[in-house]
Amino acid sequence: MTYYAGTSGFAHPHWVGSFYDDTSVQSSSILSVYAKSIPFVELEQTFYRWPRPEVIEKWAAQTDKSFRITFAGLRRITHEKRLRDVEPLVQYFLNLVAPLEKRAGPVVYQLPAFFRKDVDRLEKFLAAHQGKIRVCMAFKHPSWFSNDVYAVLKNHNAALCFSDSPDAQQELVQTANWNYARLNKIDGDNDASLDAAVTLVKNMAPKGDMFVVVPPSVAGPTTAQRLQERLRA
């Protein structure tokens, strides 16, 4: 069991003074500063566009192999094409992140609320990843929360994303030997909130890796660090 507690993004200006100093924020190696004390990061900007290959290579050079980078699935795949005929895009993404080696964590695909269940399309989409990267699915439409969908996820060792957001349609269902959670309500300055988060995470933790994302607030890095300490205790 390996726990990874991190934040969404790593280059937030409002962290200057509390987590970064002015020099580190202006540096092109800011990820290396982040990675010294936090074991993983979720990149939301990849929902809009993929990074250039040279950026991927820079991230690989700046981080240890124990660090993990997770990616938001591209909007063109989830919202524009809605998982249909996206095999070339998936293959491009697999080639793009290959230089990260073990640093490449899961890719999290957030489907739009208007996208109803399509089991056959989901099956074909997951198969396109060829088991080369872990896939996490974040559903919004309630039709996706069904046993036939869970069976497809299990067949591809794909995780069902958990979110504690009030508007999230969520069930605690284990579909992979790893898991992924977004904790938006956590308060890193409150011991009771941290303890509740630890209990929740450990109750849903599989035998493999467990990824936990906290909000990128001013206290985000500290929250991730404190949560990480408690999870590993």
Image: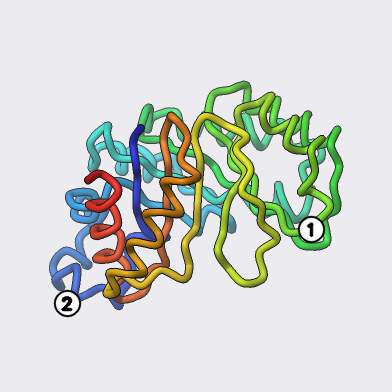
Q: Residues within 10 Å of mark 1 (few under 14, many from 20)?
A: some
Q: Is residue 28 above or below residue 211?
A: below
Q: Is residue 204 above or below residue 33?
A: above
x%, y% of residue 47?
A: 58, 55
- Residue 17 is tagged as 2
Q: Could you tell me which quadrant the N terminus lies in?
A: top left
The reply to whether callout 1 and callout 2 are in contact (CB within 8 Å) is no
- Residue 141 is tagged as 1
x%, y% of residue 20?
A: 18, 68
Q: Which type of secondary structure does the marked residue at label 2 adopt?
A: loop
First of labels 1, 2 by sequence position: 2
Residue drawn at (36%, 40%) of the image: 68
Q: Is residue 39 above or below residue 141?
A: above
Q: Is residue 153 above or below residue 185?
A: above
The chosen color scheme is rainbow
x%, y% of residue 104?
A: 42, 35
- For the residues marked 1 and 2, what is the alpha-carbon distance in whole angstroms? 40 Å
Q: Is residue 124 left or right of residue 174?
A: right
Q: Which type of secondary structure does the marked residue at label 1 adopt?
A: loop
Q: Amino acid at mark 2?
A: Gly
Q: Is residue 141 left or right of residue 207?
A: right
Q: Nearer the viewer, residue 222 or 36?
A: 222
